[in-house]
Amino acid sequence: MFSLAMRSVRHRPGRFGATLLASFLGAAIIMAFNSLHDTAGAPGVDDVSSETLGLAAGVVGGYGTLLVFFAVASTLTVNVRQRDEEIALLRSAGATPAQIRWMVVGEAAAVAVVAALLAVGPAVLGGQALLTGFQDSGQVAKDVDHVFGPVAVAAGFGVTVPASMGAAFLAVRRATRAAAGTA
């Protein structure tokens, strides 16, 4: 089923473009703001700068996580709804709901991993821009250097991939139930 999922992604790039874009933008935002956690925890950062960076990263990063989940969920729901005929055909050919779920969740995971990988570069630049904005407004000391580290990367992948998989699971669950009802 995973190979079928990868063929489906390859043969329908337009359908997955919106999911890729939503995941990419979400991962970039999450990683950019969570890089402020890495920066706040770096050696030599004063307490005031550390608190400002940690607070901004926590608040915006938390809301960003919710926004990413809902953006990805809505794009995946539309994607799955557009595939009603394909799902019904797979069901009539003998595919089980679990196999169809695995196919769609596998597609979503693959797209999310690619999106998160592509988002690393823009997230580094975004995190640097955020730090510069805090420094220009006097909220963070000028001598603080931007750090893009494990917190940013873990948050980007740790939110984007599971959110995509969870959203795909929920969307395909509805679709397979509807297909079973029409069969």
Image: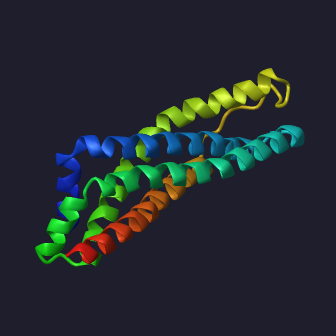
Residue 183 lies, with reference to residue 45, above or below; the image says below
Q: Specify how the rendered protein is coloured.
A: rainbow
> Considering depth in this image, is 88 or 23 the residue closer to the camera?
88
Total numbered labels: 0
Where is residue 88 drawn, in percent x and y? 19, 67
Q: Residue at the right extreme?
A: 48
Q: Residue at the left extreme?
A: 93
Q: Residue at the top extreme?
A: 136
> Considering depth in this image, is 124 or 176 the residue closer to the camera?
176
Question: Image quadrant for the N terminus?
Answer: bottom left
Q: Is residue 18 left or right of residue 14?
A: right
Where is residue 30 drawn, in percent x and y? 58, 45
Q: Is residue 19 left or right of residue 51?
A: left
> Considering depth in this image, is 86 or 34 the residue closer to the camera?
86
The residue at 64%/27% (across/down) is 129
- Splitting the image into 4 quarters, where does residue 171 fall? bottom left
- Splitting the image into 4 quarters, where does residue 84 fall? bottom left
Where is residue 149 drawn, in percent x and y? 60, 46
Where is residue 183 drawn, in percent x and y? 19, 76
The residue at 13%/78% (across/down) is 94
